[in-house]
Amino acid sequence: MGRAKKVVLAYSGGVDTSVCIPYLKHEWGVEEVITLAADLGQGDELEPIRKKALDAGATQSLVADATQSFIADYAFPAIQANALYEKRYPLSTALARPLIAKLLVEAAKTHGADAVAHGCTGKGNDQVRFDVSIAALNPDLKVLAPAREWGMSREETIAYGEKYGVQSPVKKSSPYSIDRNLLGRSVEAGPLEDPWVEPLEEVYDLTQAIANTPEQPEYVEIDFVQGIPTQLNGQALSPVALVEQLNQVVGKHGVGRIDMVENRLVGIKSREIYEAPALLVLIQAHQELESLALTADVTHYKRGIEETYSQLVYNGLWYSPLKDALDAFIQQTQKQVTGTVRVKLFKGSATVVGRQSPHSLYTPDLATYGAEDSFDHKAAEGFIYVWGLPTRVWSQQQRSGS
Ligand code: ARG
């Protein structure tokens, strides 16, 4: 008895997911494997990937253009949440997983499959994100993860695939494990496994080394409407075009690199290099606009929400009741977050140098040190008396006590 009859497999064209096709059929008795390759802006050509799945024995090979939804439905809400895992990683890989899970669940329904599958191993976060997202969307659907169980080394995996028509990788395999999409690149393994070792320049692809960046600064103006980026330098752009163009400009100035050791959900620390030029600048600009348009208490409270939100997304809980509740809070705050932010890019740094909003709470009459000042200075004295009262009482008690 097989584990399932008909399976929809998340397919990237790489060795592991390709070997999953014959493995599911020959080892686990699956009758039909339908592959699904989602275009998330990896920059790969999809037609050869589609063919490769058929050569490896897939009954059908589906390709889905998911770029618009990826940016509009996953990346932009994360920008509204200023989502940075451990205050640094903008979740560029993590955000793709709930979308792929949704596409798998939909395809399983359309094609009458009784299971879905992915090629993740047992050590990463992505297996968690797939399994939990799929369970949230359809708790009755089985999830198969052959690479988590097969226990083959890389060489054995390649050899197994060759027996069943999976071409071994043509390029000399890189020492790195790379995940790429429209939001950026995540690179780990190889020489990066030593956290003391500085990454070689070859690790980077979307961002220039400082030595090669322009000698003149460049300014970009980003417009937001209710927390959603809508224009670059006054030009309205689709979500995908906006991210693509901003990646170019920001990357050219060497901005958008992160070198970090992070805490995975499965308890392992890992060293990862990220490039996410547009996403990082969008979060920075968005946060700056919030400082103009949100009250102090909402801003401060939201920072705590953002931390929880980032952990949920990292830990595979995109589709969960707590995430839904946080979304509702965040959406409420974003009604005011409309305006423009001007960012200066130069030699590896992005600096916000201007911001404006029709909802700005910044009040020149109150803030000014000039003659137009309308702030009642005398009122400060009474305020400070009351504000400082508990501290005064505490201090007196300390002095008079033992
Ligand atoms: N550590 C990141 C995350 O958990 C990226 C994982 C994929 N990285 C890779 N180099 N293949 O979201």
Image (cartoon, grey):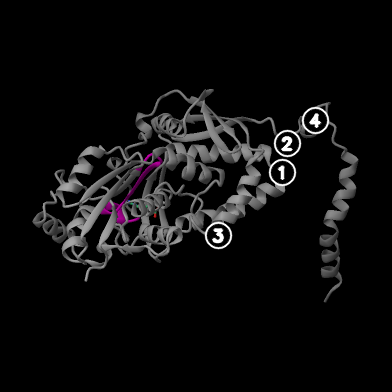
| Marks 1 and 2 in Cβ contact (< 8 Å) | yes
Disc 4 to disc 3, how far (Cα)? Answer: 44 Å
Quick check: can you spot residue 113? Answer: yes
Q: Amino acid at mark 2?
A: Leu
Rendered view: 236 above or below 392: above
| Mark earlier in primary sequence (4, 3) | 3
Question: What range is drawn magenta here?
Answer: 181-195
Extreme left residue here?
A: 163
Disc 1 to disc 2, how far (Cα)? Answer: 7 Å
Per the image, the residue denoted by label 2 is 361
Disc 2 to disc 4, how far (Cα)? Answer: 12 Å
In the picture provided, is 302 more to the left or to the right than 256? right
Residue 190 among those drawn in magenta: yes
Q: Which mark lies nearer to you, 3 or 2?
A: 3
| Mark earlier in primary sequence (1, 3) | 1
> For residue 369, what is the image quadrant?
top right
Q: Secondary structure at mark 2?
A: loop
Residue 110 percent location from the top left of the image: 35, 51
Residue 16 percent location from the top left of the image: 22, 55
Identify which residue, 110 or 282, lies in the foreground. 110
Q: Secondary structure at mark 3?
A: helix
| Mark earlier in primary sequence (1, 2) | 1
Rendered view: 248 above or below 21: above
Per the image, the residue denoted by label 3 is 321
Q: Amino acid at mark 4?
A: Asp
Residue 314 percent location from the top left of the image: 45, 56
Residue 128 percent location from the top left of the image: 39, 61
Labelled disc at residue 365: 4
Per the image, the residue denoted by label 1 is 295
